[in-house]
Amino acid sequence: MSAVKGAPKPSLRVERAQVTRTRIADAARTLFSTRGYGSTTLTAIASEAGVAVQTVYAVYGSKAGILRALRDAVLRQPDAEALFEEALRQRDPDGQLHLFASSIRQRWEHGHDVVAIHQDAAATDPTIRREVEAVLAIRRNGIGRLAGSLEPALAPGVGVARATAILDALTLPEVYAELVGVQGWTPDEFEAWLVLTMLQQLLGLAARR
């Protein structure tokens, strides 16, 4: 019986290219957050990353290209996506909200600053604004699906439309940024608060954990 071979390791050149790509993205993320998207130049990003500005152009093409890569990294979080899909499959509404809270905590713990950067960029760039609106539509659609699945368990007076609005408001990245980034809560504390608040507002089960 022949030995099973593992997947080939990436070449040194590929590994170096990925390191460079990550360094540029991280540098841009820092500068976009501290200086603002409009005030950050590709030259400044290159200097922060320790690479030539031509390298930034070659890898990403533009500031907008870097921004899209940062956005994609936030959107494509396998762990957060898996938690959300499990929440949709879960039949117990209490369990659904716990899973949903975990997915939100996971997503914003690694990307709430990128959302703020996009909002800053969208204020002056119509193309980015349209892209942000498209992402928000996807988010609201997902929240609407969750609210619909909760309908049989919703408290009296809380319909699907109201549940969708509540879920949307409670899970905005700005809420996470305020409580964790400004008020000093831990991500665990945010997640626990989110669970209890959703139980109270949607199911009327504030005392349950």
Image (spheres, rainbow, N blue to C red):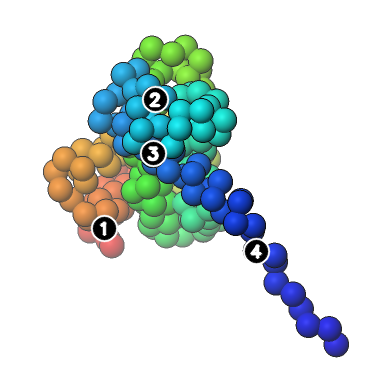
Give the camera-side residue of 48 and 201.
48
Secondary structure under tag 4 reads loop
The residue that appears at 36% across and 15% down in the rendered structure is 123
| Any part of residue 6 in sight | yes
Label 4–label 1 contact, CB within 8 A? no
**Disc 2 marks which amino acid?**
Thr
Residue occupied by mark 2: 43
Query: What is the distance, in whole Å, between disc 2 and disc 4 at their CAs?
Result: 33 Å
Query: What is the distance, in whole Å, between disc 3 and disc 4 at their CAs?
Result: 26 Å
Tell me the number on the disc at residue 6. Answer: none
Where residue 109 appears, x then y in whole percent? 34, 48
Secondary structure under tag 2 reads helix
Query: What is the distance, in whole Å, between disc 1 and disc 3 at their CAs?
Result: 32 Å
Foreground mark, 1 or 3, reads 3
Q: Which tag, 3 or 2, sits closer to the chain's start? A: 2
Residue occupied by mark 3: 49
Residue occupied by mark 1: 188
The residue that appears at 49% across and 49% down in the rendered structure is 19
Q: Which tag, 1 or 3, sits closer to the chain's start? A: 3
Report the side of 201 relative to 53 (left or right): left
Residue 154 vertical placement versus 71 (above, below): below
Foreground mark, 2 or 1, reads 2
Secondary structure under tag 3 reads helix
Callout 1 crowding tier (Cα within 10 Å): few <14, some 14–19, many ≥20: few
Query: What is the distance, in whole Å, between disc 4 and disc 1 at their CAs?
Result: 36 Å
